[in-house]
Image (cartoon, coloured by chain):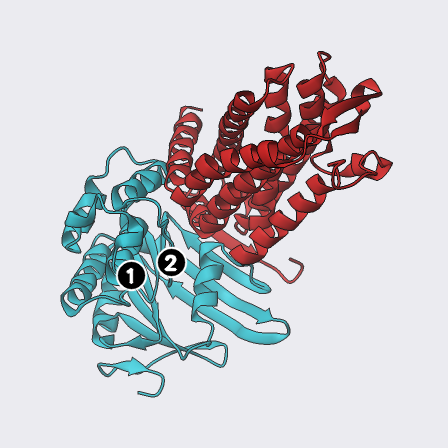
Amino acid sequence: MRTAGHQARALDGDTSATATRGPSLRMRDVRKSYRGRPVLRGVSLDLFPGQLVGVVGENGAGKSTLLRILTGDLAADSGVAECRGTVGSCPQDAVLHGAFTVEQHLWFFRTAYGLNRLDRAYELLDQLNCTGYRNQRVETLSGGTRQKLNLVLALMHDPQVLLLDEPYQGFDWDTYLRFWDLARALCDRGCAVLVVSHLAYDASRLDILYRLGAGVLREAEQCGTSGWGS
Amino acid sequence: MNRWWSCLWTALRFALIEQARNRLALLIVLLFVPLWTTLAFEVVARTPLRFHVRPVGRWLVMDANVLTQITGALQALTLVIAFMMFIATARSALFDRRLVQAGYPRSCLAAAKCATLVLVAAVVAVYATAWTHLLWHPAQPMVFAAGMFTGALTYGAFGIVLAAVLRSELAGMFLAIMTSSIDLLLQNPMINPNADSPVVRYLPAHGAVQASVAAGGLHTVPWSSLLLGAGWALGMTALGMTAFAVRTRTQRLPAAQAADQHTARSATTSGAR
């Protein structure tokens, strides 16, 4: 478990970057209901630069709602949700366009992010072992390769806050391990990473693990694999 | 401003690629338009029919097959372009939203959609006019094409509207087919002897039908019909763009931090929202 040491490094090791700027992501008493059914009943969370934080919860617990509020996709009923810095978001279902190739996706998002070059995107494709698919249309790709592209689009502009919703679904074991290496490397560069999943196989890779249940976020005891029912 | 133009150019390029990849629609345009216009011209009886041309306040006598060919060509155009724009808008809805969240100017995506609509409508209108010209010679081919163009624009924009409010592709296509059929069948005097009823003036393709028929048989430019068709096209496009804006909206950020999405994203919400 890396919580204490890593958080201490984030908070004390770089006072100018962290302590003075405060958390990269801050949620205070966020509430959300759907047709009178409360999903979030006052969620509060701080995520500092360099932290890798996980949120687990059973299906329908409100994990995706939490992320959608943070990405601006959804309005909370009350409370404060705030991200500071460039945000990268990887939605649960790969949001891609079947008519375009991988390369065309990169060009589209290069324009969206205002990037001059695609070097970082190519580097990420290489790390995720899908450079060979650059000229293939998305509709011809496997689910796992689509998910890799989904992730690359969230990372290619080197965001300061990264919001990942079930980011490794469909990955093979090697890619799954590469994903964690990538996530840790991003944290080492000062990125704040939030991973949301129904099950965290490797809770020990996280700095902090939270469980979302009954609409409330609580810090979980970490013991290898965590999840509802585990 | 440079960034805006760069974004617009990229969005336009990809919107055209997207249309070009819709092979089914291209096949329908290539085959369905000539098939329907030729069959209507060759198979339908050449019985003379009276058609009330409102812009000039005159009755025009035309053969039933020519009138059916005109409304048939318009129906083929309206259905094909409604299908093309509906499919393109529906399939890119979530992707467009993600692009906007990533910082892509929504106005560029909307402008690219409009430009694509205009381009596609112009191409199919010219194509339908060319086929018509092979069968018979409209008195004013350019005006005839302009009439077809306004009808195509109106229904292309209607496709965008439908894609924004419906989730099912089947429901969207069903509504487009039903609307186009009601609209154009009611204006064909061979099917509806009361096609000059005042009620038909309020149908979306009324301007397009009037302009095309007038251009087919008269040498007077039916300005009021062309303007009516353009009005319908503009109104429907505005509705489509509003629906697009609503579907791609993100929760707005507080003014202090919303200036640059790349430096801050903050979503502060309150009970009043």
Q: Which residue is rendered at x = 32% and y = 44% of the image?
A: A100
Q: Residue B85, position in %: x, y?
A: 51, 41
B162 up-or-down from B241: above or below:
below
Tag of residue A11: 1
For chain A, the rendered hue is cyan
Residue closest to the eye, B152 or B65: B65
Secondary structure under tag 2 reads: loop
| Residue B104 in view (yes/no) | no
Residue closest to the eye, B94 or B178: B178
Tag count in the figure?
A: 2
Q: Which residue is rendered at x = 53% and y = 46% of the image?
A: B86
Tag of residue B138: none
Q: Residue A64, position in %: x, y?
A: 44, 67
Q: Point out the image quarter for the C terminus of chain B.
A: bottom right
Both marks 2 and 1 on one chain: yes
Say which amino acid is labelled 2.
Pro
Mark 2 falls within which chain? Answer: A
Say which amino acid is labelled 1.
Leu
Q: Which residue is mark 2?
A: A23
Q: Point out the image quarter for the N terminus of chain B.
A: top left
Secondary structure under tag 1 reads: helix
Q: Residue A69, position in %: x, y?
A: 49, 60
Q: Which chain is red?
A: B
Residue closest to the eye, A19 or A164: A164
Q: Which residue is rendered at x = 77% and y = 23% of the image?
A: B61
Q: Residue furthest top?
A: B219
